Image (cartoon, rainbow, N blue to C red):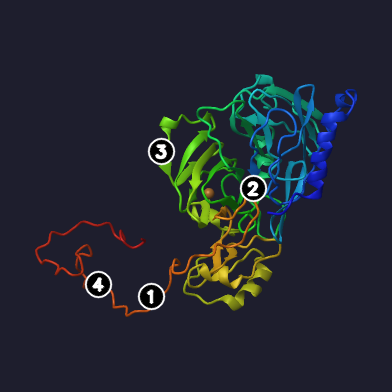
Amino acid sequence: MSSPSRRQFFAGALATVAGASVARAALAGLPEPVIQTSVATAPPLVPHTGRPYNPVVTLNGWTLPWRMNQGVKEFHLVAEPVVREVAPGFKVNMWGYNGQSPGPTIEVVEGDRVRLFVTNRLPEHTTVHWHGQRLPSGMDGVGGLTQPHIPVGKTFVYEFEARRPGTFMYHPHADEMVQMAMGMMGMWITHPKTPHPHIGEVDRDFCFLLNAFDVEPGSKTPKVNTMTDFNIWCWNSRVFPAIDSLNVRLNDKVRIRVGNLTMTNHPIHVHGHEFTVTGTDGGPTPPASRWPEVTVDVAVGQMRQVEFVADELGDWAFHCHKSHHTMGAMGHAVPTMIGVDHRGLVGKIQKVVSDYMLMGERGMADMGEMEMPIPDNTAPMMSGTGPFGALEMGGMFSVLKVRKDQKPGDYSDQGWFQHPAGSVAREYTGPVGQPLRPPNGTTPSAAPSQKPLATAPLQARKPHAHGGH
Ligand SMILES: [Cu+2]
């Protein structure tokens, strides 16, 4: 993560000035839209007006500044085409808000009166639905049902009170399949007004959206008619290794809020720690309902927030547990080539079939190591290099970095973990005997040291029942 961009800094400063000293007449107009194009994780936006709170950090994203206008928090969202760097060397034409997909995180406090101006710079009409909020029906943003669509070039205004604390999302409810497939979405956090019995204080509060795209290898624009066959699995429109790590201090209390706006579920898994689910779409969970887990499934349209104490030093993988979601651009027709050495042919085949990619002939680990040849503007299928070599990961994967010397409030990446001597898995160099295998035709369940009994009853087994494990 890098320091705040100058652009963001000045934008924040301007918002402060506007809130503090601009004449009332000027406040009758729209707040200036703040645009952010940096892919770096912005530092938390400490509130300059209104009730105080401990702000969140949006992975590879940022929080939208607001201005206070006679007690109302005013935000200005601009729906527009954007170019998102999903990974270095892989840029995608998306639709988003204020320069990015996803749009900026909106952070408010329970009880805040919120006014949101939405300007439509898309080539078609849109709306914004405030997913999960309690609000007047006419502010719910469902085009045709609760409001007319926002025409191209027009600005609509939404206004409601943030009635309950929790983790929320926003997205269009207009040509939804296209607009969400193009990247239109964002997060919304409502902090509690007063200490809440079910909401704990934390040292670090992260949030991100799960989102997915279907981008043909070598192309730059998502296919918008895809229903389930997405191939770019993102957190905040980024894929590993372009997703920032979650950098925390030893014994920090950590909260991670995850929203899912893909079209499938994602079991989100942390290594080295157990977490509890402290919040869902409906708000904070009562403590008596919580239990420890290391994986939480986040279904389509859901939000989950998990909390844990980061009390184990190290680099801990944090990822979706569907293994094809930690892969990059998988062509849909990649043949299995295990056992075939055809590396020399790839260039020739790509001249005819542009999205043809080489599948490793000994499994796929080869490809992470060998930087397999891929078409231009394509996310590598598996990449990222760790201190011990190729990580063979892509897509929905990041690293929780727990460090003793990470300063409070510092979210910067300190590099790879320095393992204490003797604490890393290593090669065993002693003698290794041949495994004992039961002779052909005997029951494999008999322990090798036991002589299979001729009179043992036959066990019924499905064919290949033990073949794939
Ligand atoms: Cu997944």
Closer mark to the observer between disc 4 and disc 3:
3
Residue beneath the point at 63% across and 71% down: 349
Q: Which quadrant holds residue 217? A: bottom right
Direction from residue 462 to residue 322 in the image, left or right: right
Q: Amino acid at mark 4?
A: Arg
Contact (Cβ within 8 Å) of mark 3 with mark 1: no
- Which amino acid does the dot numbered 3 rest on? Trp
Q: Earlier in the sequence, mark 4 or mark 2?
A: 2
Viewer-side residue, 416 vs 372: 416
Rounded to the nearest angstrom, the CA distance separating label 4 from label 2 is 50 Å
Label 2: element kind: loop
Tell me the quarter of the picture where residue 399 sits. Answer: bottom right
Q: Of callouts 3 and 1, which one flags the residue occurring earlier in the amino acid sequence?
A: 3
Compute the Cα span from label 4 to label 3: 42 Å
Mark 1 and ligand 1: say if the CB distance to the nearest ligand atom is below 8 Å. no
The answer to the question of whether label 4 and label 2 lie on touching residues, with beta carbons closer than 8 A, is no
Q: Position of residue 128 (x, y in %)?
A: 70, 31
Earlier in the chain: of badge 2 and badge 3, it is: 2
**Which label's residue is closer to the chain start, 4 or 3?**
3
How far is disc 3 from disc 1 in space, using C-alphas? 38 Å
Which residue is tagged 4?
437
Ligand 1 under 8 Å from disc 4 Cβ: no
Q: Is residue 448 above or below residue 118?
A: below
| Callout 1 crowding tier (Cα within 10 Å): few <14, some 14–19, many ≥20 | few
Q: Which residue is mark 3?
A: 291
Q: Could you say which disc has been placed on residue 59 in the image?
A: 2
Q: Residue at x 77, y 48 (%)?
A: 37
